Image: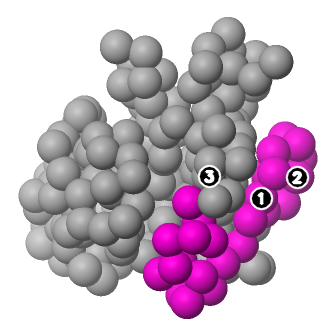
Amino acid sequence: MSKPFRIAIFASGNGTNAEAIMNYFQSHSLIEVGLILSNNKEAKVLERADRFNVSSLTFDKTEFRDPATILTSLEQQSITHIVLAGFMWLVPRYLVNAYPDKIVNIHPALLPKFGGKGMYGMHVHQAVKNASELVTGITIHLVNEHYDEGAIVLQKTCSVASSDSVEDIADKVHTLEHHWYPITIENWITK
Ligand code: GAR
């Protein structure tokens, strides 16, 4: 018997956040991860999905632009909520319209700082270092058809030392993400 809330996770790469989410909801009473979707056939997140026995689907740009391909898969899996976890493409309007206020993203900085097109992954941490920021963090926000612009659900901060490398900053941010993203998804879905 499937659970009332079923998440689809879109991820483009490594998928450590996707893993933290699959792990957190593994034996949850109300929420389960039903599908992992990726634009990258080589993405490590696909191996992580296999390990958790979660179905996965890959797509190219043409398929992503075609509502039928993606929406049919989401409907077949009875997906109620969408989670972006390191997904690097802009979400098309048809998907936002099909899941209004039901799509959430995590951004590895304190929006509105260091957001927008081209600001993803290590580029963000490099920009934080270049700007000599003393604080960075995470932003979890609802998704609309513009990069990094939906309503903010949660922000958490961590300090940045001048001696921190870009990788150090990324590690600190990842630690925050793995802790806060699953809990925040749970609260957002069940509130
Ligand atoms: C995460 O830090 C996430 O915040 C970021 O990509 C990383 C993916 O890591 N997302 C963005 O930059 C979106 N603009 P992961 O593949 O290990 O979860």
Colour scheme of the rendered structure = one colour
* Few, some or many residues within 10 Å of mark 1 (<14, 14–19, 20+): some
Q: CA distance from mark 3 to mark 1?
A: 11 Å
Q: Nearer the viewer, residue 124 or 19?
A: 19
Q: Secondary structure at mark 3?
A: helix
The span picked out in magenta is 45-71
Q: Secondary structure at mark 1?
A: strand
Relative to residue 65, is residue 99 depicted above or below?
A: above
Front residue of 183 and 36:
36
- Looking at the image, tell me whether mark 2 or mark 3 is earlier in sequence order: 2
Q: Which residue is mark 1?
A: 56
Q: 10 Å neighbourhood of mark 3: few (<14), some, or many (≥20)?
A: many
Quarter of the image with the C terminus is top left
Quarter that holds the N terminus: top right
Query: Is there CB contact under 8 Å for labels 3 and 1?
Result: no
Disc 3 target residue = 74
Q: Secondary structure at mark 2?
A: helix
Residue highlighted by disc 2: 50
Residue 130: percent from the left, percent from the top? Answer: 19, 77
Q: Residue visible at 30% across and 45% down?
A: 100
Asked whether disc 2 touches disc 3, contact meaning CB atoms under 8 Å apart, the reply is no
Question: On the image, which quarter does residue 61 sit in?
Answer: bottom right
- Answer yes or no: is residue 190 visible: yes
In three-dimensional space, the C-alpha distance between marks 2 and 3, rounded to whole angstroms, equals 18 Å
Q: Residue 100: say if magenta.
A: no
Pointers 2 and 1 in contact (C-beta within 8 Å): yes
Compared to 5, does 167 lie above or below? Answer: below
Q: Residue at x 59, y 41 (%)?
A: 79
In this picture, residue 27 sits left or right of residue 169: right
